[in-house]
Image (spheres, helix red, strand yellow):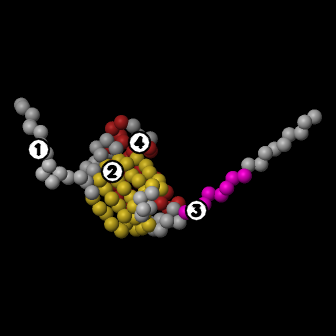
Amino acid sequence: MAQRREKKTVRSKKRKIHIPSGVVHIKSSYNNTLISLTDLQGNVLAWSSGGHIGYKGARKGTAFSAQQAAETLVRAAHEYQMKKVNIITKGPGPGREPVIRSFQGSEIEVETIKDITPRPHNGTRDKRPKRK
């Protein structure tokens, strides 16, 4: 009779990376809110969005879905033992404020909040108004 040999699987331990400070990038549109957690060099550590949480369609653009996405990133920041973050927001959507509040309400210290929403400096001419 043939003997069965059981294979032993060797798994390496997951290293805990200690990153003391990072940057939270928020791109908020009317349809969705994308949130990225990066280190100071810009390497993405974790990301989340309204669609990534599980919402579809118009629910992705709500403030509640953005808040839930931010809470998942707060947990990811705790895994990296992050103590301080800088927040950079971009876009006009409704998800900007709940994300900032989620990070301020956690144990993570918010150092700066910066808005880099692109605005024209008198660029091309606006479209003509619609006729009634």
Amino acid type assigned to the residue bearing label 2 in the image: Lys
Q: Is label 3 or label 4 in front?
A: 3
Q: Main secondary structure of the magenta part?
A: loop
* CB under 8 Å between discs 4 and 2: no
Which label was assigned to residue 27?
A: 2
Q: What stretch of residues is rendered in magenta?
A: 10-17
Q: Earlier in the sequence, mark 4 or mark 2?
A: 2
Which residue corresponds to the image point at 35% horizontal and 53% vertical from the top-left?
A: 26
Mark 4 and mark 3 in contact (Cβ < 8 Å)?
Answer: no
* Residue located at (44% from left, 66% from top): 21
In percent of width and height, residue 9 lies at: 74, 49
Q: Which mark is residue 125?
A: 1
Please give the residue where the numbered disc 4 appears in the rendered image: 51
* Rendered residue at 35%/47% (across/down): 33
- Between the C-alphas of marks 2 and 3, the distance is 28 Å
Give the Cα separation between the discs numbered 4 and 2: 13 Å
**Residue 11 in magenta?**
yes
Crowdedness near tag 2: few (<14), some (14–19) or many (≥20) residues, C-alpha within 10 Å? many
Give amino acid for label 3.
Lys
Q: Where does residue 99 sit, x and y in percent of width and height? A: 36, 55
Query: Disc 2 on helix, strand or loop?
Result: strand
